[in-house]
Image (cartoon, rainbow, N blue to C red):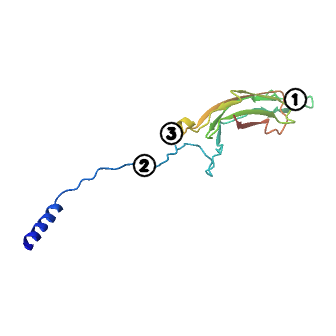
Amino acid sequence: MKKAISILLVLALVLSMSISAFANEIDSETINVPASFTAGTVEIVGPDGTTTTATVYSVKLNWTAITGVSYEAANTYYYWDSENLTYVKHDSSTDAGWSDASDSFTINITNQSNDAITAEAAFVKADGIGATVNCTFENNDCTIASAAPTQAEVEAGILTGSAKSDTITADITASGTLNSGVTSVGTITITIASA
């Protein structure tokens, strides 16, 4: 009888192990995993990486040939008049005067800077030349845009700019008598400044 009870107990244990147990969910909680996003910026900075934009000026001047003005002194030729015992001025003599009393030329200004510029030409007559010399300019004090792309273009991915240029035209005229030995009638100065 003990054997029979033992078998029944073993059988009951085996059957109880094959029964699946089910548990109901008691509670749940959802937790957000934090993250942060910082928007990037597109800025133009100085060569040292600071947020201070460095202005880099690069301007090229290209002058067309200046031939200048030319003055020729008198060429006086005399021949001996043996009957009157005097030198007489020969007809081949020439009077002093301007062989070329004017000149025109252009000054091309190319801006390769990351800032707009102005260009202005000025003429200063040399001292002690005797003659009257004038110089007039067309398109003087011109403004030339920056060669760099705009902030909007940089933000759109356009990083390469293009050189900008303009031209000043000069006309020189001379009159009167030029003193002997003069090699320059004046100077022209081009002044470049931030626009």
Q: Residue at x 10, y 66 (%)?
A: 8
**Considering depth in this image, is 129 or 125 the residue closer to the camera?**
125
- Residue lying at 64% horizontally and 38% vertically, measured from the top left: 115
Q: Which mark is residue 31?
A: 2
In the image, 20 versus 111, the foreground residue is 20
Question: Tag 3: residue type?
Answer: Ile
Q: For residue 94, what is the image quadrant?
A: top right
Q: Secondary structure at mark 3?
A: loop
- Name the residue at 37% across, 49% down: 28
> How many C-alpha atoms fall within 10 Å of the one at disc 1: few (<14), some, or many (≥20)?
few
Q: SS of the residue at dot 2?
A: loop
Q: Which residue in the protein does label 1 denote?
A: 88
Task: Tell me residue 173's x, y (percent).
Answer: 76, 27
Mark 2 vs 3, N-terminal side: 2
Q: Which residue is mark 3?
A: 158
Q: Is residue 93 above or below residue 26?
A: above
Q: Are marks 2 and 1 in contact (CB under 8 Å)?
A: no
